[in-house]
Image (spheres, grey):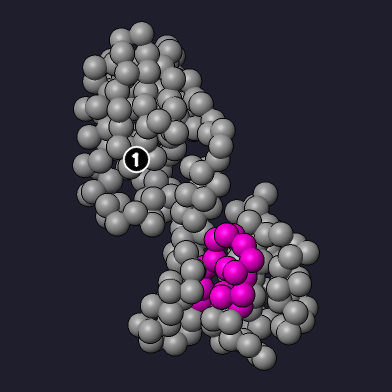
Amino acid sequence: MFNILLIEDDAALFGEIRQRLAQWSYQVHGITDFGRVLEEFAALKPELVIIDIQLPQYDGFHWCRTIRAHSKVPILMLSSRDHPSDMVMSMTLGADDYVQKPFHFEVLVAKIQAILRRVYNYTSDRPELRTWRGATVEPVKNTVSSPQGTVLLTKNEMFLLNILVEHKGQIVTREAMIQALWDNEDFVSDNTLTVNVNRLRKKLEPLGLDACIETRVGQGYIATEEGTL
């Protein structure tokens, strides 16, 4: 379970976000004193910080700058103002992403998932090796190895394969795959997902694994397990 610090003074919005994120097994914590945000951040040690730009005492830009000076924790900014300068300022101060209010909750979840997956799944000193149908999937090297040889995948292809193999034997919906890859501009539509899955299959063909990623029409994709073909 990831701990998220939500720096938001709108009690109703805070409660809604906390309730909705709890459905995704995220633990959301708030601020009790908006003049002591840094102290509360240090005490909690969250894996992600979400900061509203409009806050009492000091604005979100101040706290983004202050937290970034002390930590590399990922930061997601929220703003109710339709000012491109807010996004520019957020990124300049070290924020990892930006969401404008009002937002669809699915977009917020997708952004959170993408940040957490990128920061904590792919920067680990010991990324998890996965085995699949006699092959070894190694994210840190972007390789898949089997007795037939080794193929090198692009980062995006490995991202897709890792999601499928993590849930091997289960259908991964197209929506879930697109959400997980939301922060990558190559994956912004249903059509581009299809194209990239086909490219992944082509890469896996020399290992005899291309047919092991099946399309389930109207649902998504599945990395089949041994004996299911």
Q: Residue at x 59, y 60 (%)?
A: 73
Q: Position of residue 185 (x, y in %)?
A: 29, 57
Quick one: label 1, few (<14), some, or many (20+) residues within 10 Å? some
Q: Position of residue 36 (x, y in %)?
A: 75, 79
Q: Residue at x 38, y 78 (%)?
A: 88
In magenta segment, residue 73: yes
Residue 99 appears in the picture as rendered: no
Q: Residue at x 57, y 60 (%)?
A: 72
In terms of depth relative to the viewer, which is nearer, 74 or 203? 74
In terms of depth relative to the viewer, which is nearer, 39 or 194? 39
The boundaries of the magenta stretch are 63-78
176 over 4 or under it: above or below: above
Q: Quadrant of residue 221?
A: top left
Judging by the rendered image, the residue that carries numbered circle 1 is 155
* The C terminus: image quadrant: top left
In magenta segment, residue 103: no
> Label 1 amino acid?
Lys
Horizontal relation, residue 148 to residue 11: left or right: left
Q: Residue furthest front?
A: 69
Secondary structure beneath label 1 = helix
In terms of depth relative to the viewer, which is nearer, 61 or 70? 70
